[in-house]
Amino acid sequence: MDELTIAMPKGRIFGEALALFRQTNLTIPEEFSEDSRKLTISLPHIGLSFFLVKPIDVPTYVEYGVADLGVVGKDVLLEEDRDVYELLDLKISPCRLSVAGKPDWLVPLYPRVATKYPRIAKNYFKKQGQQVEVIRLSGSIELAPIVGLADRIVDIVSTGRTLEENGLVELEVIGSITSRLIANRASYRMKAERITSLCDQLQQVIKEGARV
Amino acid sequence: MTVLRGFEKPTGFHDLPPQLVRKKRRIEDRVRMVFENWGYEEVLTPALEFAETVGKASAISEQKMFKCIDRQGNTLVLRPDLTAPIARMTASVLKNEPLPLRLSYHASVFRAQENEAGRNAEFYQSGVELIGNASSTADAEVIALAVEALQNCQIDSFQLAIGHEALLDGLLRECIRNESSIQKLKEQLSQRNMVGFWEALQELDINYQAKKELLYLFQLRSCKEQLTSVRKLSETTQVLKAADQLEEVWRQLEVYGIDHYCVLDFGLIGRIGYYTGVYFEGYSSSLGFPLLSGGRYDSLLTCFHRNLPATGFALDVNRMMEVSQLECEKRERFVICYTDHLYEKAIKKAVALRKQGKVVVLDQISKPSETSKETILSDSHVIWIV
């Protein structure tokens, strides 16, 4: 049986993704959780091994083929633009990718947008026919309009509470985001049988309404 | 811009030290032998071509091409592939040659890349073009040739996925009337976005059964099963004709005895836009990237006013180097250490040994007790003439 290696994202998505995998008929031991400091776990009895990486890096590991599969948010997939198969919408960790700003926002002379997603932001505003300068930040994006670094931000919004607490409002929705199962191009061929069967199992769980 | 250091090279370009060149040579030699055995003759084309003609025909995206300007002000491109230059050649120098033409090449191609490991701006391709034969026999021939080339380079486990541009197009057209929807679905497939493909399909105003059938067809299964389902579900001539072609190709692959290396994938679509029929990609289990791709491109030659069907493929030699099990041949090697006044004897000995096909290095030493670099480093036979 081919062994499958799966790159899992640390943080927000991890718990939900693991819960999903647990609901298939694969037996994943209880001690495998994010708090364990181990970055890799091998489960030879079910022919799976997992490793934990930063979410933004998941598509890279999969494209290079060191992981056969990966779980990753659509936001990261859009931003990274890697050559991988997008196999399954896992329908977990739903949120929106949005443009936000202060409630009294008006188009300034030189619009500036702060974001963790420079590629998505550039493409989006280009499509809107707006010329904006994009500033890349790696965290605390909501701060940018408050301190005057940028007039708007592009970021993921789930409940909207963080925006609200910082006095910002959602101005436009770029798209809705869920987590996806992705596959390496060669693994998709060479391990087709295993990947298809795992996909079918996950699909079944998703259809029945996963408990996450 | 930081100051360039002496050792730096442009992004994506590499030096090959002797051990890598040995490996590259070894692979190219093996591939060349296979190509020759099948009657494919090697050609060379210029490194620079006009952007207007070959550049436009090549279908590699504009921003990936390296450009420069000649003294007449024409924009030139460093060849981004060999298929377009060979098409140009076919329409000019080889215009009067009898058809079909079987041509091969071993050359580097140039595509600008983002700065990242594993993405070469200059990479080596070995490939073939079979021009002037529209039959399934030609399609089967190039696929079989690709398999033999991989086998000869000792790539241990590999697979070729085979799709068909016209079959995919026909299947979509059968249930979708709207041109932009068809393009959108194809785009999702070429980006390998199955989720996007399914979503786009859901949005369409076609009946549930048709959607189900389409999705069913795009699952990977055995060849026979898939072709049977296509025949059952489809009635347009475009689809049935393509299915006939695939079946014919498959029958021939069985005769070659290589069908177990191949799978059909109706959702497979080339990222380069000029493919018109059978399209295929080859993968190995020890590398995350494809080793080869190719297929039928029946309309490319019309860019050069020659209306000829053609098919072919290109192997990515850099990636073959990563996965090939080929060991480099070791030749018997001699080092002749001699002191200055005995040079005549040393040279004569070297000439004699080289005539026998041995590798001989002449190493002059200043006194008999000296150890030379050659004797310390290599596993050569040492002959002392002191």
Image (cartoon, coloured by chain):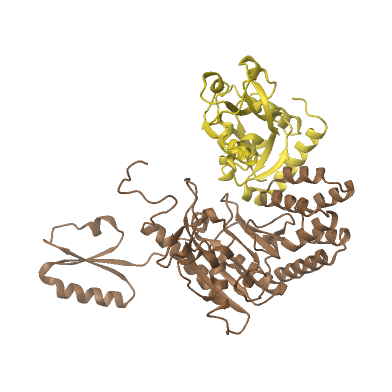
Chain colours: A yellow, B brown
Residue A119 coordinates in the image, percent (x, y): 57, 38
Give the residue at x 41% y 54%.
B14
Residue B280 coordinates in the image, percent (x, y): 66, 61
Q: So how many labels did they put on this image?
A: 0
Quarter of the picture holding the N terminus of chain A: top right
Which residue is at the front of the view, B379 or B295?
B295
Quarter of the picture holding the C terminus of chain A: top right
Which residue is at the front of the view, B206 or B240?
B206
Give the residue at x 72% y 61%.
B165
Give the residue at x 83% y 53%.
B176
Horizontally, residue B221 falls left or right of residue A185, namely: right
Q: Is residue A75 visible?
A: yes
Residue B77 coordinates in the image, percent (x, y): 48, 62
Residue B41 higher or lower than A149, as above or below: below
Give the residue at x 69% y 24%.
A158
Residue A193 coordinates in the image, percent (x, y): 72, 48
